[in-house]
Image (tube, rainbow, N blue to C red):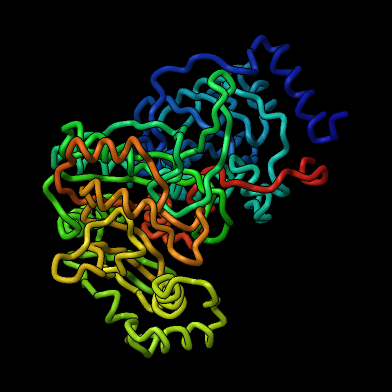
Amino acid sequence: MADRFEQARLEKLEKIESLGHDPWGQRFDGHQPIADVRNAVPEVAGEPGTEVRLAGRIMLRRKAGRLRFYDIRDQTGRIQLLFSRGDLSEEQWALMSALDLGDIIGIDGITWRTDTGEPSVRVTKLTILCKSLAQPPEKFHAVRDVETLLRRRYLDLIYNDGVLERMLRRSQVISSIRQTLREQQFHEVETPVLHATAGGAAARPFVTHHNALDMELYLRIALELHLKRLLVGGIERVFEIGRVFRNEGVDATHNPEFTMIEIYQAYGDYRSMMELTEQIISRAAQAVCGTTTVPWGDAHVDLTPPWPRRSYEDLFEEHAGCSMRDAAAVAEKARSLGLETEGRHPDVIINDVFEETVEDHLTGPVFVVDYPASLCPLTRRRRDRPDTAERFELFVQGMELANAYTELNDPRLQEQLFRTQLEGLSEEESMARMDHDFIRALKTGMPPAGGLGIGIDRLVMLLTNSRSIRDVIFFPLLRHETDSSRS
């Protein structure tokens, strides 16, 4: 049974229908962005403007004698509408009187600036486009309950200032990235989401089953191995922006389903990828923020290239207080941090200590370069130091934004590394999963290459000053809705 608010709206719905209008709308061509109309309003109060056509949702309404003022909003902005009995027929005035907050309307009118200087439109014709049957949040103030915001993102977008603008910046970021890559002759492709082998990253996959073929499949945890097959096939500069899925925890920087871009450049290396990363991110910042210096909390981050390069080993010694080559000292440091050491490979312990002691200090942007090779089974080793991988991770304000390699293209070494499992790592924690067809592709011959992965969600977090990944994903994963939260 409808509550009293919904019942009142249903009565107005019947009124609209009785006036001969379709409350669920119609095609409404030729409407202009509200932001453009605001900019075209006459500078002088009371001076007639130009004819315009707008569509939007009613956000506010108030009376002033024989006048009615409604604010409507579209995705570009908000503007005041002025309804006067002298401008409308009795039928149109009755239609206007049957409107509620949240209704979507179209109007034709004349731009106008009020005596108080407010950009407005005097309405000459009103069209109902959708009747809202749901009561807006109490007193029409912003929604504050986080659970409600995430579960009913549409309310967040409608009633909380700045949310829609922030989410649309995500599209600007992706458009900027695509433009940067197209200018450098990269080709965008699509590769499978369902994989026979969960490879290309250290993560626990989601498992599914294909009924017709009676085979177990995995939602992809990375884009890497299929894109490298395309390098083998002759696409020398290739990228994909796609969803990946990791059956892991949820926190401020992790969601089980997220968006990555992976990029591969034949005849490049991890240094090539550093230069490309600087271009991609600094240009995205310029596109979204108009500057390469962006706010982050109370601080500002300067993304103007070039960015510092710091070695993994030097940072470890600086912040952990011991050499990563002193196994006994590293183990002692790990135990002092409460980290598990029993049955774990020395390089795994080193990386645990690195994550615990170093990453929070990487305000950045800073490239951390040259990781322990045993942690990087898909990465080429340095010729002068075979125990070191040509890999970097980009950190900004302690958050990892990008990961890149000089790609390993020796099929014999790759097969050997796939067969090697580091002590203390479960299969989900290791990237060393055998993909026989990928080895077969490498035997065909893959050109030397640099490869780069950037977390799109985290990049959008940085460029919109958002402290949680849930603030930049339209529909983050949540627990099942309880009966009480459905009301």
Q: Residue at x 41, y 72 (%)?
A: 351
Nearer-the-camera pick, 55 or 123: 55
Residue 168 in the image: state x and y as whole percent.
41, 43
Residue 4: quadrant of the picture: top right
Q: Residue at x 82, y 46 (%)?
A: 484
In the rendered image, the vertical position of residue 70 relative to residue 473, given as above or below: above
In the rendered image, the vertical position of residue 274 relative to residue 184, given as above or below: below
**Residue at far top of view:** 20
**Residue at far left of view:** 267
Left or right? Give the position of 42 relative to 219: left
Left or right? Give the position of 385 relative to 476: left
Residue 64: quadrant of the picture: top right
Residue 35 in the image: state x and y as whole percent.
38, 39
Q: Residue at x 44, y 40 (%)?
A: 243
Residue 319 in the image: state x and y as whole percent.
37, 85
Q: Is residue 182 visible?
A: no
